[in-house]
Amino acid sequence: MRTVKLDLGPDSYDIVIGRGLLAQVERMTALLPQKRAAIVTNTTVAALYLAPLQKALEAAGVQIIPIVLPDGEQYKTWETLNLIFDGLLTARAERKTTLIALGGGVVGDMTGFAAAVYQRGVPFIQIPTTLLAQVDSSVGGKTAINHPLGKNMIGSFYQPQLVLADLASLDTLPDREYSAGLAEVIKYGLIDDLPFLEWLEANIERLMGRDTDALAYAVERSCQNKARIVGEDEKEHGVRALLNLGHTFGHAIETGLGYGAWLHGEAVAAGMVLAARASYELGQITDADLARIIKLLDAAGLPTMAPALGYERYAALMAQDKKVDAGQIKFIIMRKLGESYMGTLSPEVIAAALQAGCSDDAAASRVA
Amino acid sequence: MRTVKLDLGPDSYDIVIGRGLLAQVERMTALLPQKRAAIVTNTTVAALYLAPLQKALEAAGVQIIPIVLPDGEQYKTWETLNLIFDGLLTARAERKTTLIALGGGVVGDMTGFAAAVYQRGVPFIQIPTTLLAQVDSSVGGKTAINHPLGKNMIGSFYQPQLVLADLASLDTLPDREYSAGLAEVIKYGLIDDLPFLEWLEANIERLMGRDTDALAYAVERSCQNKARIVGEDEKEHGVRALLNLGHTFGHAIETGLGYGAWLHGEAVAAGMVLAARASYELGQITDADLARIIKLLDAAGLPTMAPALGYERYAALMAQDKKVDAGQIKFIIMRKLGESYMGTLSPEVIAAALQAGCSDDAAASRVA
C-alpha cells in the first residue's frame, strides 16, 4: 500500500493506492461526519463493485443511498447531474451526507461537481475504478460537466477528503480504457519527468501485461507528479496548466468527433503527438524525440494520428477552450523531451502539425 | 457615499452604497482583468438600466456581452442558468471575462452561481437594484438556483469582487418589492441589533416614504450587520445561520404556495412572525414583544399571517431545508427581543405557532 499526500493546507488529503482497498472501509468511515453516504456510480461499475462496497459500509453502520447513472461520456451532462440531485433530495440527503464517487472519470467529475454544489457543498470521497481516473481525474479537485458548446465548461475546483485507488478494480477494465489511462501516465513523463518517461519506455510491456508492481509504481509516480503540480497551483493560475499537455488538441478531437466516439485518453494521446509535432516544427525537439513519443504511445495501444477535421474546424474548436486568454489560445509545448511549458503557436505551426499528424483513417480506427 | 468592507482575507471586497453609482463605472473598470464583461439582467431591469450601464462601460472601452433573462423567481432554474452559459459560450467569454449581475436577488443568485461554475469560476460584480438584494442577497457570496424539490438547493459560496448598491435604482421599485426588502432589514434588528430595531420602529414612516437619508442609513446598517456575521463565518458553519431567521418557515411558505406567489421577503416576514410565536410559546419573548414585531412588519407593508398549509405540509416542507442535521430541523429562535440563536423546536411548539400564526385568507392576500 502506498500513500501520496496532496498538500493544500486545510483541504489536504491522502491518495491511497493498493489492491483490495474497497473492502477496507474504515479509511472512509473515519471521515464521515454522519453515518450516511450516497454512493454514485454507473451501470457498468455498479454491476461489479456497488454491492460489495455498499455491504461493507452498511456492515460498519453506514446508511447508503445508491445512485446509479448511465455509463458514458455522452451522459456527462446537466440532465444526468440532475439524477444525482433527484436521488439526494428524494432521500433527504443533508449537508453532512458524504458523496462517494465509485467509477471512472465521468462519474468522478460529475459526483465531485454534485458535491460542490449540492446545498452549496457536501463532503466527498473519490474511489476511481479506471486507470485514467486513478492517475488523473480523481486527483486535484477539478470537477465538471460538459456543455453542448464545450467540454468541462461548467464545474468547480472542489477537493475530495480522500482518494482510494484500488488497483484490483483495474482487473476488469477493458483494454481500450486501460490504454486510455496510460496516455495520462505518459503525459507526466512528457511534462517534466524524463526519468519516469524513460522508465515507461523500459516497462511498457510489463504495464501492458498489467503487472501489479509496475502498475502500483506507475500510479504512485503519476499521483506524486500531479500532487506536486496541484499543490503548487490549486486553481490553475500557472504551472497547473501544464497538466493540459495534449488537451487543447485533444478536446477539439473529442468535441469534433462527438463526445464518446474516442475516449478522453485516446484524444489526449493524439493531441500530445500534435503538440510534439508543433514542438518539432519549432525546432525544440528532434525527429528522434518525436519518434520515441510516438513509439511509446503506440506500444501503449493508443492512437498517434489525429482525425482529419481540417484546420478551420480545429481552430474553431480550440478557440472555445478554457485556456484562451484575450483571444490567444494557450498550448502546452515541449521545450525538449521531458520538459514542457505554456505558450502560443502561430497558425502556420498549428497547420503544419495538423498536416503531418492527421489522417483520414484515424477517426474510424477507434470505433469499437 | 458609504462603504462597508466585507473582510474575508483574500476574498475581501467593498460594498459601496449611494445614489448614482451606476454611472460611475471607474469603480468597476479598475477591477476588470480584461476589457470585457457580460451584464446579466432581466427583462424588467434591462428596460430601465441596461442601456445606460452598457453605454457607460463601452465608453470606458469595455466590450459588453448583454444577457437578458426572463423576470421572476419561477425562472431561478437550471434552464434559465443555461441561458447565461449559452450567452457566454456563444460570445466566447473567457476565464477573465467578468460577470456583472444587474438586478434583484434572483438575477444576483443566478449570475453569482454562473460565475462560480462557468469554466470553474470567473470574476463577478454585483449591482443589486432591489432593496432586498442591496441589504441581503448580493452581500456574502451565497449563490444558488432552485430545484423542483427545494429552494436554493444547488449553489455555491462565491464572493463578488465588488457590490454597488445604487439607491437611485430603488426609485423604480414597486411598493410590494420595496416592502419585501424591508423584511430583511427588520431581520437584522431581530437577530442581534436591538438599537437598530428601535431605530426602525421610530423611522418606519420615513423609510416607507423612501427618504434618501433614512434609506442610506438602513442599507448601510444592514450591510454592516451582514458583513460582520459573514466575516465571522463565511460558509455557514455557525453564526451565519442566524441570517436564516424566518427562513425555515419562509421557504416552506414559498415552496408550499409555489415559487413566485409570494415574494421571498413576504414569506420571510410571515416566517419571522412564526419564529416569534414559537419563541413566545417557549416563554422567551412577551406578548408585548410579539405585538411590536407584528406592528413593525405591518407598518412596513408586510404579511404577518402565514398561509394555512396545515401542520403536516409545513413539517414535510421544512424537513427538506438545508439546515437539517441528522433529521433535526434547525430553527432560528428569539432568546429575547433583538437576540436570536439556533436551536430545535418540538412538534408541539411548531403546531402552536402555526395554529396562532396561519390564516385561510393569508395566501390570497398577496396575489397581485
Image: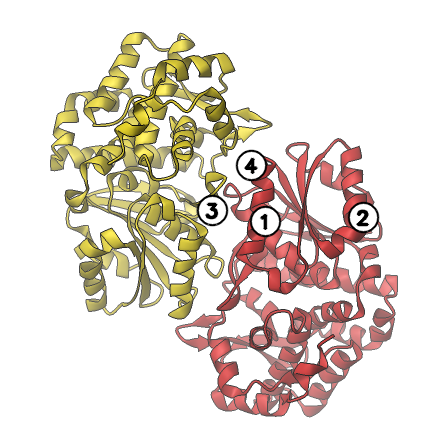
Chain colours: A red, B yellow
| Whether marks 3 and 4 lie on the same chain | no
Q: In this view, does B11 lie to the left or right of A300?
A: left
Residue at image point 52% right, 82% down? A314
Q: Is residue B188 visible?
A: no
| Whether marks 1 and 4 lie on the same chain | yes
In what element is the residue under mark 2?
Answer: helix
Give the CA separation, mark 3 to mark 1.
19 Å
- Label 1 or label 4, whichever lies nearer to me, is 1
Q: Position of residue A150 (x, y in %)?
A: 51, 68
| B33 and B106: which is toward the camera | B106
Q: Position of residue B296 (x, y in %)?
A: 22, 21
- Label 4 or label 2, whichever lies nearer to me, is 4
Identify the residue under disc 3. Answer: B156
Identify the residue under disc 4. Answer: A95
In what element is the residue under mark 1?
Answer: helix
- Label 3 or label 1, whichever lies nearer to me, is 1
| A206 and B102: which is toward the camera | B102
Indicate which disc residue B354 carries: none
